[in-house]
Image (cartoon, rainbow, N blue to C red):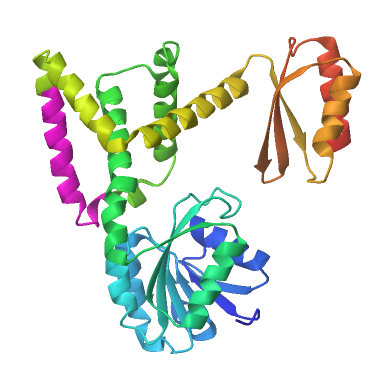
Amino acid sequence: MKKNLEIGIIGINGKYGKWLKSFFRELGYEVIGSDIQTKKTNEEVVKESDVVVFSVWPRVTVQVIEDVLPLSRKDQLWIDITSLKSRSSDALKKSHSSVAGLHPMCAPSVKNFRGQTVIFCPIRISKDWEKWILSILNNSQAIIKVTDPITHDKFMIYVQALPHISYLIMASIIRKMDIDILESLSYTSPIYRIGLDLIGRILAQDPSLYADIQMLNPNVKELMKAYAKEVKNYEEIINGKNIDKFISEFHLNENHFGKKNIQESYQYFEKIIKLLTDLTEENSIIIKAKEDKPGILKQIADIFNKHGINLVSFHSFKKDDGYEFHIGIDRSKNDKDIKNVIKKINEIFY
């Protein structure tokens, strides 16, 4: 496919719309878009674009697509990136264009798709357009899962709706039982800390999206029945002090997940605990660098080595304004030598 394609994003001022604009521009494409209060309209975007991306709330996706159907062309590609696919794919198929669904399984806070799962639904698409999409995803090092819209929506009740509602219920219980969050953290275990962080991540975002995920997917009704049934099941087990039944349920779940999956999950969780320990270590310091260049880690380590300071952990994180290095040291971060080293490194790199 030619590199001089015009990419049109409907919903360009939303979080994912902004992310996609940056993503496509970095690939060298011209990007235009429309949104509430933009000069350019949805109709103008469709007329001027080779690829039309619908990045709007799930509840309005179908209507937005149907409003511009008369403007679709056979040479175009229309893509929906919302978290529900069956309803939007039915609307897309009414167009004259090649149509596909994409669902990035990550928030628009990531830098790119590297290591992230992106679900691809090739609804009705030409070989050239399919090749174009797959080349972009492969070049961005995404993990590509190919499926159909119906299967996608069925799995979303387990991948999205189930964990979301579980943590929202946990948040409601903590609130309604009037639990002091800060006080509870003084008693925390790693699993509770991570649970609170997952709640915080959800509550920091727009509730409308989570409402759409729960209420627009017809499969969620079946999920909620199963959820209520299991809550009742465990209520009876625990209130009846039925240890044998509890252990039996435990082993049934263990067998279903399988030893390999359980072991991988256990090791993954241990890595998370280790990372959290390093990042919250009392003698952990943070150093920032504006530039990403070869040898920067060696330069930083050499400065610490020159002053006889041993490093016990080292983690780097990409930020919008550069990099952050979280470094664990073998002495108090309030030590005079440590403060001098930090000052020297910051003068060099930041």
Indicate whether residue 166 is drawn in magenta.
no
> In the image, residue 287 lies at what x, y percent?
75, 30
* Apparent side of residue 23 relative to residue 246 in the rendered image (left or right): right
The residue nearer to you, when weighing 176 against 170, is 170
* Apparent side of residue 44 relative to residue 253 in the rendered image (left or right): right
Q: Which residue is at 44% across, 52% downward?
A: 105
Q: Which residue is at 11% across, 29% downward?
A: 232
Q: How many marks?
A: 0
Residue 156 vertical position relative to residue 192 in the rendered view, above or below: below
> In the image, residue 89 lies at what x, y percent?
32, 72
> In the image, residue 128 lies at what x, y percent?
52, 82
Instruction: Please tell me whether the stretch drawn in magenta is mainly helix, strand or loop.
Output: helix
Q: Which residue is at 38% across, 81% downward?
A: 68
Residue 69 vertical position relative to residue 117 in the rendered view, above or below: below
> In the image, residue 290 lies at what x, y percent?
78, 42
On the rendered image, what quadrant is the N terminus found in? Answer: bottom right
Q: Which residue is at 89% across, 17% downward?
A: 307
The residue nearer to you, when weighing 249 against 198, is 249
Q: Is residue 117 visible?
A: yes
Instruction: Write the start and end of the magenta stretch as one range.
Output: 213-235
Classify residue 139 by image quadrant. bottom right
Indicate whether residue 216 is drawn in magenta.
yes
Classify residue 90 by image quadrant. bottom left
* Apparent side of residue 238 relative to residue 338 in the rendered image (left or right): left
Residue 318 vertical position relative to residue 195 in the rendered view, above or below: below
* Apparent side of residue 197 relative to residue 65 in the rendered image (left or right): right
